Image (cartoon, coloured by chain):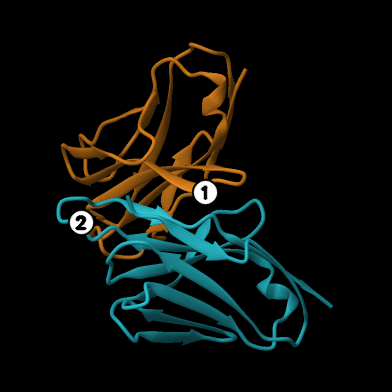
């Protein structure tokens, strides 16, 4: 089944404790992206990747890191999480930048 | 900076009625997407509108794109409860090397019996 998977789905952590949210797709998509969704703000793009080893900032990259060492994986790293990073995070992928994106199930992160 | 505005943000309608959601955007773009999100779920692609004048229909939903007016509409015909969801439009930032996708804030649609 073609899909985008994220892990974990739910995470509660404390300020400053490094964490990684994994994202994997099995559709051989070139383009991958991370978004955060907050009430009243909609979805905002954090980082995107056009292909392996090619990443760039979205609208809200501060406090996040990404890497794209393999085509199928695009992990999101929070080196020192803060409470304002409490949010619902979505990973998405597509054949290319100008194609519809397929979204993962989401990761609900709470930073206390 | 590309801005995407949806109207209305909240829409409560009765079953059987028609209504339109509007998506305005601020810079030139020739591609627009509509997504649906059910409560507590992920986003699902509804339509990709590729050019000026594009119209796509799926069931009771019809989307159109006017690139000259920088406007897309999502029309709901004879609404049913199953259409209750949040609908997002998203616009490709046609800025050369800028590959960002910008979403509107979403329209929360509630269809009442």
Examine the image and state in which quarter residue A3 appears. Answer: bottom left
The residue pinned by badge 1 equals A105
| Residue A60 spot, x, y in % from top left | 39, 36
**Picture layout, residue A112 above or below residue A4:** above
Viewer-side residue, B70 vs A35 = B70
Q: Residue at x 39, y 60 (%)?
A: A2
Q: Is residue B62 left or right of residue A46?
A: right
> In the displayed image of the protein, which residue is found farthest to the top?
A16
| Residue B49 spot, x, y in % from top left | 35, 76
The local secondary structure at tag 2 comes to loop
Q: Are marks 1 and 2 on the same chain?
A: no
The local secondary structure at tag 1 comes to loop
Q: Residue at x 56, y 82 (%)?
A: B75
Chain coloured cyan: which letter?
B
Q: Is residue A57 left or right of residue A46?
A: left
**Mark 1 or mark 2, whichever is nearer to me:** 2
Numbered disc 2: what chain? B
| Residue A31 spot, x, y in % from top left | 26, 52
Disc assigned to residue B95: 2
Examine the image and state in which quarter residue A28 appears. Answer: bottom left
**Picture layout, residue B4 above or below residue A111:** below
Q: How far apart are labels 1 and 2 at the CA level?
A: 30 Å
From the image, which quarter does the C terminus of chain B lie in?
bottom right
Q: Residues within 10 Å of mark 1 (few under 14, many from 20)?
A: many
Numbered disc 1: what chain? A
Q: Colour of chain A?
A: orange
Disc assigned to residue A89: none
Q: Residues within 10 Å of mark 2 (few under 14, many from 20)?
A: few
């Amino acid at each position: 089944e073609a899909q985008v998977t994220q892990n974990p789905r739910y995470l509660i952590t404390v300020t400053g404790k490094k964490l990684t949210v994994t994202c994997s797709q099995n559709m051989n998509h070139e383009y991958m992206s991370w978004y955060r969704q907050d009430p009243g703000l909609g979805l905002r793009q954090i980082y995107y990747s056009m292909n392996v080893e090619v990443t760039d900032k979205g609208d809200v990259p501060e406090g996040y890191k990404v890497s794209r060492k393999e085509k199928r994986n695009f992990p999101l790293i929070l080196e020192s999480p803060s409470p304002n990073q409490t949010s619902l995070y979505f990973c998405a992928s597509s054949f290319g930048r100008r194609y519809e994106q397929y979204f993962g199930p989401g990761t609900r992160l709470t930073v206390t | 900076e590309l801005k995407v505005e949806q109207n209305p943000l909240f829409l409560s309608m009765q079953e059987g009625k028609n209504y339109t959601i509007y998506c305005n955007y601020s810079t030139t773009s020739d591609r627009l997407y509509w997504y649906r999100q059910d409560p507590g779920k992920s986003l699902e692609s509804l339509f990709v509108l590729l050019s000026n004048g594009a119209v796509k229909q799926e069931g009771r939903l019809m989307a159109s794109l006017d690139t000259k007016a920088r406007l897309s509409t999502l029309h709901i015909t004879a609404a049913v409860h199953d259409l209750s969801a949040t609908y997002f439009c998203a616009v490709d930032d046609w800025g050369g090397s800028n590959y960002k996708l910008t979403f509107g804030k979403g329209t929360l649609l509630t269809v009442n019996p």
